Image (tube, rainbow, N blue to C red):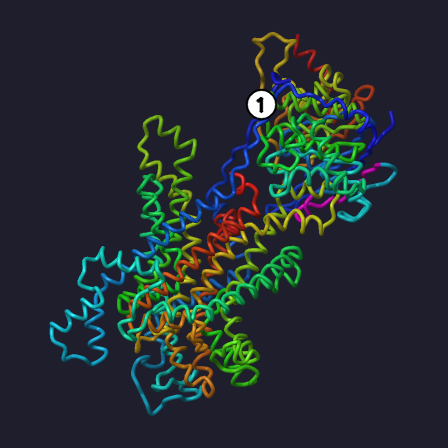
Amino acid sequence: MAILLDVKNLQTRFDTEAGVVKAVDGVSFHINEQEIVGFVGESGCGKSVTQLSVMQLIPNPPGRIIGGEVWFDGKDLLKYERNGSEMRSVRGSKISMIFQEPMTSLNPVLTISEQIGESMQLHLRLNKADARKRAVELLSLVGIPAAESRIDDYPHQFSGGMRQRVMIAIGLACNPRLIIADEPTTALDVTTQAVLLELIKDLVKRFNTSLTLVTHNLGVVARYAQRIYVMYAGRIVEAGPTNEIFAHPRHPYTVGLLKCVPRLDQPRDKQLVPIEGLPPNLIKMPPMCAFLPRCAYRINRCEKSHWPPLTPVGEHHSAACFVNLEATLENDDK
Amino acid sequence: MRGLTRKMSSPVRSPFRRDLTGLKESDVTTYIVRRLLQSIVVLLLVSIFVFLAIRLMPGDPIKLMVYESNLTGLSPQQLADLRHEYGLDKPLALQYLDWLGGVLQGNLGISVFTKTPVAKEIFRRLPITFEIGLWSLLLSIVIGVPVGIISAVRRGTWIDQLVVTLSNIGVTIPVFWLGVILMLVFSLYLKWLPVMGFTPLTEDPGMHFKQLVMPVICSSLFSVAALARQTRSSMLEVMHQDYIRTAWSKGLNENAIIFKHALKNGLIPVITTLGLSARGIVGGSTVVETVFSIPGMGRLLVSAVSNLDYAYVQGIILIIAATVVAINVLIDIVYGWADPRIRYS
Amino acid sequence: MSSNETTWTDKSETPPRASEWRRFRRVFFGRRVVVFGTVIIGFLVLMAIIGPWIAPYDPIKINLRERLQDPSWQHWLGTDNYGRDILSRIIYGARTSLQIGLLSVGLASIVGMILGGVAAYYGGWIEAIIMRFIDALMSIPVVVLALVIAALLGGGETNVIIALSVSQMPQYARLMAGQVVSVKENDYILAVKSLGANDWRILFNHLFTNSVAPLIVQFTLTLGGTILAEATLSFLGIGIQEPTPAWGAMISNAREYLMDHPLLSIAPGVAIMLVVFGFNMIGDGLRDALDPRLRGRL
């Protein structure tokens, strides 16, 4: 499998009143062609900011990308000027985004036709009539019935789930190589979530597109993603194939995440265990592992060392932890 | 479009159809008619206030008139006759209905001082006030809105600083004082413009416009500043919205973002400010016309108020209220045109 | 997948009071214009209080021998056509402006809040009547409304205050009505009410915590506008009557001598501008510091 997107040592900062927030602190990852990759972590762990940084969509001020490389199609996207023409020719055409809030991510005063059609007019050089025709096709493709009659409606005339379908249509419009879906279904009710994720998966497969699926829902990644990156406090703490990580988690944070997911393969009376404590304050970060205060498996070395680097723990599987978790967990079970 | 057209024939079917609740387009005319009916209620209320407020005030217009015109020798019988002549001896409700009936036929009453129909004089002066008002409104929009947009787009630059400072000062300058200062500078010192007065367009177009320059500047100053402030702050607010981020993610350039995506949203609150500005300009005509000795409706109101000439006061307030209500209806229509969320609900 | 929902503990740490106060101070004094405005208003209040002790001359006593003097060491800003010291009249005028401004905005806010609150709380025809009454008042421009009321009542300080407060009242009624409606529609309130809690107490608690910020901001911003309106009335000869020193009337009076003695007109105008500017800036600063969400709305 060829690598489509290769991100190296990405660093994004936010200047706030209280100080500088290291929202993304040296994150490296890659996305292969036609692959679905999940990014998991709590709110504020930097998973969304990472994706926005790839697209250089971080609002500046207060945000700024201070380092790293984003290789795509043989070019480092971070070398491009933030809203310059080269960066803009990537956005929406080669990489597109689906955002979390369908209620606010569509422009309330423009028709659906205009909003789906405009990127095709821009990137594919379609005229208005052709763009509209394609918009209707896309709209029925994402499962909006009577697309022809809904195409000139405004966003507020659609329900939340329908609006997210429109967002998906916008994301697909120029047939991009990569779609970044940032918590695409979090704002929706559970049944709509399931339907939309299936839809996204089908469409991505059909168009041979890669998908980055950002979510705080481990269930979602388990079902759709081939690989997972687990993020905590602006860093990747564990990375690997989905099955491998679910079967043999190697970072205490991942273990914690898994413990609070109900599983069908375990007895019903087994309790769900929430992770104790709060996510760290990203402004005053001690040099040690950020998960330390909440970690149940910490050892002496953790308190004396700097943050552990991401190190291989298996084939394609790596974790940022000093503890030999597999051995510890086995002991626990006995 | 890799593969899109080929596979388009079999749309992915959604097993769930319940998120299919599109809102139905309601009739735009109904919306306007409803607003018009509300406006009529408001105008009727204003007419009742105006009528009652003036009738219930201390001070009897007849006695006042007698006093003013030094006719102190009138007998009680003569006073009663005068009262009867002006219908002031009837019950209050009847007086109101009489008056309202007249108003609806374009008869705003007869001044007890000048003994002439009030409507005639008001409508003679109305065009003058309207002309100044329209020029002022136009000037406010043409300057205030673009300046606000530029300021928001170039946030933090010296242009923005200048606009913010000037508009902050602009809303604090007393209109009458600005008039006096403009006169001092441009008429008395520089002698570029006539000090005051009004010449009809048909008589001397050059003089007509020369005399309008300072009044229009004065009456538009506040709205220029207010519109610039509102445009700036609502554009800044809009630029932070999620849908602007969506627009950026499509690869649009800054101009398309500002003019296609942000402006239409950003101008919606500005429409409200525009309505308030128009109301302010109507109110400001009293001051501006007094300062520049312009024979418009505003100055007529000031002198009617000073003389307690009730018929004029009633008539002018009614006209002003009708104008403001008409502006509000217009603003609501523009609002509905600009914001589909209002149009369709 | 719906069965394996992952939930996270929500961080709901409330910041301590002291840091809130510090944040308020930092935002409020963070803008130089706001500091400038605060200094102006501080100075105005000081003038209004200690004016009689520091004003060099009697602002009312006519002294025709010294009429229309140019600025000098005796009269820093000169004298008017009655020989009265302009500086002294401006200092005394501060008291007039502030007094009328505070009283009328105070009256307007109390009456407006009661009307708006009652309307929104009871709803139905009570609301319809009150709100249409408010609409009707709002269809007359502030200056015109104040002008007519003041004139009908016969001018003078008390009547100017009444006129100004009637014309400012509708804004407060609208503000309060909006707040009450939002309380009534609040799910939390419905829940507590269904448990049989006294709804007046809930209403007051909620209104108090939610309305203080917008009210303080509105109060400050309308103070500037009201002082401007008072000056306008006095200029038109309907407001404060001679010989009471009022800035608007001073400008009106000085117009006749504009050509030869422009300072007579300029000085009181600058005083009005500074004060209105000061209140507006404090209002802006308070809005940003208390509740940034109000930006663009007030």
Answer whether residue A70 is magenta in the image.
yes
Q: Nearer the viewer, residue C298 or B136?
A: B136
**Quadrant of the drawing holding the C terminus of chain A:** top right
Would residue C2 appear left or right of B131 to someone viewing this image? right
Residue A221 percent across, percent down from the top left: 70, 22
- Where does the magenta region start and end? A58-72
Residue C47 visible (yes or no): no
Can residue C150 be found in the magenta stretch? no
- Image quadrant holding the N terminus of chain A, namely top right
Image spot of residue B58 (x, y percent): 21, 65
Q: Determine the image quadrant of residue B89.
A: bottom left
Residue at the spot 57% in from the left edge and 36% down from the top edge: A156
Residue B175 in the figure: left or right of residue A271: left
Chain to which mark 1 belongs: B
Q: In the image, is residue A315 above or below residue B138? A: above
Q: Nearer the viewer, residue A227 or A93?
A: A93
The location of residue B298, given as percent across then percent down, is: 41, 70
C87 versus C187 height, above or below: below
Evaluate whether residue B27 shows in this view.
yes
Q: Position of residue C298 (x, y in %)?
A: 48, 53
Q: Which residue is mark 1?
A: B18
Furthest residue toward left: B76
The outermost residue toward the bottom is: C65
At label 1, counting other C-alpha atoms closer than 10 Å, the crowd grade (few under 14, some 14-19, many 20 or more) is few
**Which residue type carries mark 1?**
Arg
